[in-house]
Amino acid sequence: MIHVENVSVIYNKGTPALKGVNLSVDKGEFVGILGLSGSGKSTLLKSINLIVRPTFGKISIDGDLITNANPKKLRTIRRKVGLIFQDYNLIERSSVLTNVLLGRLGYKSRLQSFLGSFTPSEYSLAMDALKRVGLEEKSFVRADRLSGGQKQRVAIARTLCQQPSVILADEPISNLDKYTGELVMEYLYEINKSSGITVLVNLHDTSTALKYCSRIIALKDGKIVFDKAAGDVTDELLRGVYEEK
Ligand SMILES: Nc1ncnc2c1ncn2[C@@H]1O[C@H](COP(=O)(O)OP(=O)(O)OP(=O)(O)O)[C@@H](O)[C@H]1O
């Protein structure tokens, strides 16, 4: 469903952050992306959604070439792609429910977005999403009253409300303690298994990646150094990824 073909990203005409990356991800996969800080993990996820535009190469999602899409087409393709960030990206002064409803914005006209008008079925989608992450009782609480782990679960619910076919999660647990981080991973895992939503997740912690992901892609200096089933990842392979030059 995702094809990344010979993608390179060069920021500000400087050093390449990605160098000729090729990658195909099938529907329903749970892919962990590992690598040292600066290896290009965020750039790879951001280019899949065209938050960062590749300098060279092509990316398609469900057969639609996102790298060539006009603004209208790009908006339609982006509806399929849910995003989860390290710092949650919530509107802190709004309620949990309002934050989850924001997952519907990609389906709204400018006027509807401005008015913040949502249909009853969108409210019910949002409530269902909150139930799935165990936060329905927090619907009317302001987001800034929540713990970090709860905020990330709201971000997951917002993504679910968007009804995506893929979730890109950029370091979703790096601001959380081990226990809370694992809980967040459990929710992503459950969503992947029960809804068949493809998940690509950048992670720092190799043991977490091996525990939840079925496939591991490792980046080093903007290139893929290995792309393997989690069960085939050895300590030696991991050492190659994390040892400095
Ligand atoms: N907006 C930007 N402008 C210029 N250079 C950038 C930008 N974003 C990233 N880079 C550079 O691109 C390279 C890859 O960065 P990227 O953030 O993709 O790596 P990462 O593996 O996600 O790192 P981290 O784990 O620290 O987030 C790094 O050398 C980084 O300094």
Image (cartoon, rainbow, N blue to C red):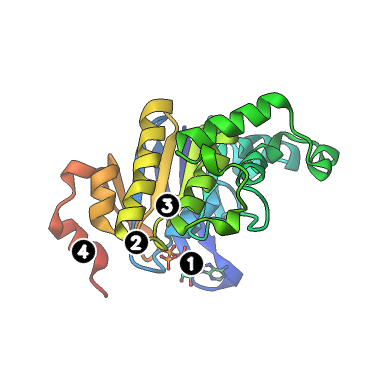
**Residue at coordinates 53% horizontally, 40% vertically from top-left?**
137
Does residue 33 appear left or right of residue 73 in this picture?
left
Label 3, residues with CA under 10 Å away: few <14, some 14-19, many ≥20: some
In front here: 5 or 119?
A: 119
Q: Do the residues labelled 3 and 1 touch (CB within 8 Å)?
A: no
Residue 21: mark:
3
First reached walking from the N terminus: tag 2 or tag 3: 3
First reached walking from the N terminus: tag 3 or tag 4: 3
Return the residue at label 4.
Answer: 240
First reached walking from the N terminus: tag 1 or tag 4: 1
Mark 2 beta carbon near ligand 1 (under 8 Å)? no
The mark lying in front, picked from 3 and 4, is: 4
Could you say whether the residue bearing mark 4 is in a helix, strand or loop?
helix
First reached walking from the N terminus: tag 2 or tag 1: 1
Horizontal and vertical percent for residue 218?
A: 31, 55
> Mark 3 belongs to which amino acid?
Val
In front here: 223 or 62?
A: 62
First reached walking from the N terminus: tag 2 or tag 4: 2
Could you say whether the residue bearing mark 2 is in a helix, strand or loop?
loop
Residue 175: mark:
none
Task: Tell me where residue 60 sits by quadrant.
Answer: top right
For the residues labelled 2 and 3, the Cα–Cα distance comes to 32 Å
For the residues labelled 2 and 1, the Cα–Cα distance comes to 33 Å
Label 4, residues with CA under 10 Å away: few <14, some 14-19, many ≥20: some
For the residues labelled 1 and 4, the Cα–Cα distance comes to 21 Å
> Mark 4 belongs to which amino acid?
Gly
First reached walking from the N terminus: tag 3 or tag 1: 1
Task: Tell me where residue 37 sits by quadrant.
Answer: bottom left
**Residue at coordinates 55% horizontally, 54% vertically from top-left?**
56
